[in-house]
Amino acid sequence: KKTFVNYWLHNAFVTMADEKMAKSAGNGYRLADLAERGIDALDYRYWMLQSHYRTQSNLSFAALEAAKQARHRLARFVYHDLKEVKAGEPSPAHEKALVEALHDDLNSPKALTVLWFVVKDERLSPESKLATLKLADSLLSLGLSLTPEDGAASLGEVSESALPTEIQ
Protein backbone atom coordinates (compact mmCIF):
# COMPACT_ATOMS: atom_id res chain seq x y z
CA LYS A 1 0.00 0.00 0.00
CA LYS A 2 1.36 3.40 -1.00
CA THR A 3 0.52 6.74 0.51
CA PHE A 4 -1.15 8.99 -2.07
CA VAL A 5 0.14 12.28 -0.62
CA ASN A 6 1.68 13.41 2.61
CA TYR A 7 0.77 17.08 2.28
CA TRP A 8 -1.85 19.14 0.55
CA LEU A 9 -1.15 22.79 -0.20
CA HIS A 10 -3.76 25.26 -1.26
CA ASN A 11 -2.76 28.40 -3.13
CA ALA A 12 -3.87 31.81 -2.01
CA PHE A 13 -6.79 33.21 -3.98
CA VAL A 14 -6.48 33.53 -7.71
CA THR A 15 -8.02 36.71 -9.02
CA MET A 16 -8.87 37.95 -12.47
CA ALA A 17 -9.05 41.69 -13.05
CA ASP A 18 -8.54 42.02 -9.27
CA GLU A 19 -11.76 40.11 -8.54
CA LYS A 20 -11.63 36.78 -6.68
CA MET A 21 -12.25 33.90 -9.06
CA ALA A 22 -14.97 31.62 -7.79
CA LYS A 23 -17.39 29.16 -9.30
CA SER A 24 -20.21 30.85 -7.40
CA ALA A 25 -19.28 34.23 -8.93
CA GLY A 26 -19.37 32.71 -12.41
CA ASN A 27 -15.90 33.97 -13.29
CA GLY A 28 -13.97 30.73 -12.87
CA TYR A 29 -12.18 28.86 -15.62
CA ARG A 30 -11.70 25.14 -15.98
CA LEU A 31 -8.68 23.61 -17.67
CA ALA A 32 -10.96 22.68 -20.56
CA ASP A 33 -11.84 26.38 -20.96
CA LEU A 34 -8.15 27.26 -21.04
CA ALA A 35 -7.45 24.45 -23.51
CA GLU A 36 -10.03 25.97 -25.87
CA ARG A 37 -7.86 29.12 -25.79
CA GLY A 38 -4.70 27.13 -26.55
CA ILE A 39 -3.40 26.98 -22.97
CA ASP A 40 -2.23 23.53 -21.92
CA ALA A 41 -2.56 22.31 -18.33
CA LEU A 42 1.25 22.34 -18.08
CA ASP A 43 1.28 25.98 -19.20
CA TYR A 44 -1.13 26.74 -16.36
CA ARG A 45 1.12 24.80 -13.97
CA TYR A 46 4.12 26.87 -15.09
CA TRP A 47 2.09 30.04 -14.53
CA MET A 48 1.13 28.89 -11.03
CA LEU A 49 4.73 27.99 -10.18
CA GLN A 50 5.84 31.54 -11.05
CA SER A 51 4.32 32.84 -7.83
CA HIS A 52 4.67 31.56 -4.29
CA TYR A 53 1.71 29.49 -3.15
CA ARG A 54 1.09 31.88 -0.24
CA THR A 55 0.69 34.90 -2.50
CA GLN A 56 -2.40 35.96 -4.37
CA SER A 57 -2.10 35.58 -8.15
CA ASN A 58 -3.88 37.66 -10.75
CA LEU A 59 -4.78 35.55 -13.77
CA SER A 60 -4.66 37.14 -17.19
CA PHE A 61 -4.51 35.56 -20.60
CA ALA A 62 -1.40 37.62 -21.36
CA ALA A 63 0.32 36.06 -18.32
CA LEU A 64 -0.83 32.58 -19.34
CA GLU A 65 0.48 33.16 -22.86
CA ALA A 66 3.85 34.28 -21.44
CA ALA A 67 3.98 31.15 -19.26
CA LYS A 68 3.12 29.04 -22.31
CA GLN A 69 5.98 30.61 -24.27
CA ALA A 70 8.46 30.13 -21.41
CA ARG A 71 7.53 26.48 -20.94
CA HIS A 72 7.68 25.97 -24.70
CA ARG A 73 11.22 27.43 -24.76
CA LEU A 74 12.26 24.99 -22.03
CA ALA A 75 10.71 22.08 -23.92
CA ARG A 76 12.33 23.19 -27.18
CA PHE A 77 15.69 23.33 -25.41
CA VAL A 78 15.24 19.79 -24.08
CA TYR A 79 13.62 18.15 -27.12
CA HIS A 80 15.27 20.08 -29.93
CA ASP A 81 18.60 21.52 -28.79
CA LEU A 82 19.47 18.48 -26.63
CA LYS A 83 17.69 15.80 -28.67
CA GLU A 84 20.91 13.94 -29.50
CA VAL A 85 22.23 14.14 -25.92
CA LYS A 86 22.17 11.31 -23.38
CA ALA A 87 21.57 12.57 -19.85
CA GLY A 88 24.65 12.43 -17.67
CA GLU A 89 24.89 13.44 -14.04
CA PRO A 90 22.95 16.42 -12.69
CA SER A 91 24.95 19.50 -11.76
CA PRO A 92 25.53 19.25 -7.99
CA ALA A 93 25.44 23.04 -7.56
CA HIS A 94 22.19 23.47 -9.48
CA GLU A 95 20.64 20.42 -7.82
CA LYS A 96 21.51 21.91 -4.43
CA ALA A 97 20.02 25.29 -5.44
CA LEU A 98 16.85 23.60 -6.66
CA VAL A 99 16.41 21.55 -3.50
CA GLU A 100 17.16 24.56 -1.30
CA ALA A 101 14.54 26.61 -3.17
CA LEU A 102 11.90 23.94 -2.65
CA HIS A 103 12.91 23.43 0.98
CA ASP A 104 12.48 27.18 1.49
CA ASP A 105 8.71 26.97 1.97
CA LEU A 106 8.27 25.54 -1.52
CA ASN A 107 9.75 28.58 -3.26
CA SER A 108 8.70 27.56 -6.75
CA PRO A 109 9.59 30.91 -8.41
CA LYS A 110 13.17 30.45 -7.23
CA ALA A 111 13.12 26.83 -8.45
CA LEU A 112 12.07 28.02 -11.92
CA THR A 113 14.93 30.51 -11.85
CA VAL A 114 17.30 27.61 -11.26
CA LEU A 115 15.98 25.91 -14.41
CA TRP A 116 16.82 28.98 -16.47
CA PHE A 117 20.27 29.22 -14.87
CA VAL A 118 20.85 25.61 -15.99
CA VAL A 119 19.80 26.42 -19.56
CA LYS A 120 22.10 29.45 -19.73
CA ASP A 121 25.10 28.06 -17.79
CA GLU A 122 27.83 27.70 -20.41
CA ARG A 123 30.07 25.85 -17.94
CA LEU A 124 27.71 22.85 -17.88
CA SER A 125 27.97 20.08 -20.41
CA PRO A 126 24.83 19.32 -22.42
CA GLU A 127 24.65 15.93 -20.66
CA SER A 128 24.65 17.61 -17.25
CA LYS A 129 22.11 20.20 -18.37
CA LEU A 130 19.72 17.52 -19.57
CA ALA A 131 20.12 15.47 -16.40
CA THR A 132 19.58 18.52 -14.20
CA LEU A 133 16.47 19.58 -16.14
CA LYS A 134 15.05 16.07 -15.91
CA LEU A 135 15.73 16.06 -12.16
CA ALA A 136 13.94 19.40 -11.86
CA ASP A 137 11.08 18.03 -13.91
CA SER A 138 10.73 15.09 -11.53
CA LEU A 139 9.91 17.70 -8.87
CA LEU A 140 7.99 20.31 -10.89
CA SER A 141 6.29 18.18 -13.60
CA LEU A 142 6.57 20.55 -16.54
CA GLY A 143 6.67 17.92 -19.28
CA LEU A 144 10.45 17.89 -19.72
CA SER A 145 10.89 14.15 -19.15
CA LEU A 146 8.92 12.74 -22.06
CA THR A 147 10.41 10.38 -24.60
CA PRO A 148 12.18 12.28 -27.39
CA GLU A 149 9.32 11.40 -29.79
CA ASP A 150 6.59 12.53 -27.39
CA GLY A 151 8.60 15.63 -26.51
CA ALA A 152 8.95 16.55 -30.18
CA ALA A 153 5.22 15.92 -30.64
CA SER A 154 4.48 18.25 -27.70
CA LEU A 155 6.31 20.95 -29.68
CA GLY A 156 4.15 20.25 -32.72
CA GLU A 157 6.88 18.36 -34.57
CA VAL A 158 5.84 15.23 -36.41
CA SER A 159 8.33 12.50 -37.24
CA GLU A 160 8.42 11.29 -40.82
CA SER A 161 7.49 7.77 -39.71
CA ALA A 162 4.28 9.11 -38.16
CA LEU A 163 3.10 10.44 -41.52
CA PRO A 164 0.87 8.37 -43.79
CA THR A 165 2.83 6.44 -46.44
CA GLU A 166 1.45 8.48 -49.34
CA ILE A 167 2.69 11.71 -47.71
CA GLN A 168 6.09 10.23 -46.90
Image (cartoon, grey):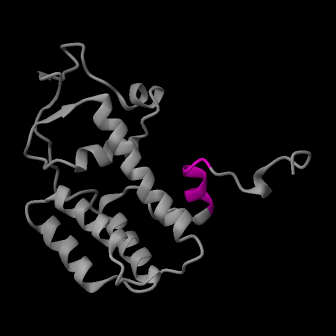
- Left or right: 139, with 57 as reference point: right
Where is residue 92 drawn, in percent x and y? 26, 85
Residue at figure coordinates x 12%, y 33% from the top left: 13
Numbered-mark total: 0
* Residue 72, image x, y percentages: 44, 51
Whether residue 66 appears in this view of the structure is: yes
Q: Is residue 3 left or right of residue 65?
A: left
Q: Please give the range of residues in magenta.
A: 149-156
Question: Which residue is depicted at the point 53% across and 67% down?
Answer: 81
Residue 130, percent from left and from top: 44, 75
Q: Residue at x 72, y 56 (%)?
A: 159
Classify 166 as above or below 135: above
The residue closer to the viewer here, 50 or 31, is 50
From what the image shows, is residue 83 above or below residue 68?
A: below
Residue 154 is a magenta residue: yes
Of 6 and 33, the residue lying toward us: 33
Percent across and percent down for residue 149 are 63, 61
**Quadrant of the image occupied by residue 20:** top left
Q: Nearer the viewer, residue 120 or 59?
A: 120
Magenta region includes residue 35: no
Is 9 drawn above or below residue 141 in the view shown?
Answer: above
Majority secondary structure of magenta residues? helix
Q: Residue placed farthest to the right in the image?
A: 166
Residue 85 located left or right of residue 62:
right
Q: Is residue 143 visible?
A: no
In the displayed structure, would residue 129 be above or below residue 13?
below
Q: Residue at x 10, y 37 (%)?
A: 56
Quadrant in which the N terminus is drawn? bottom left
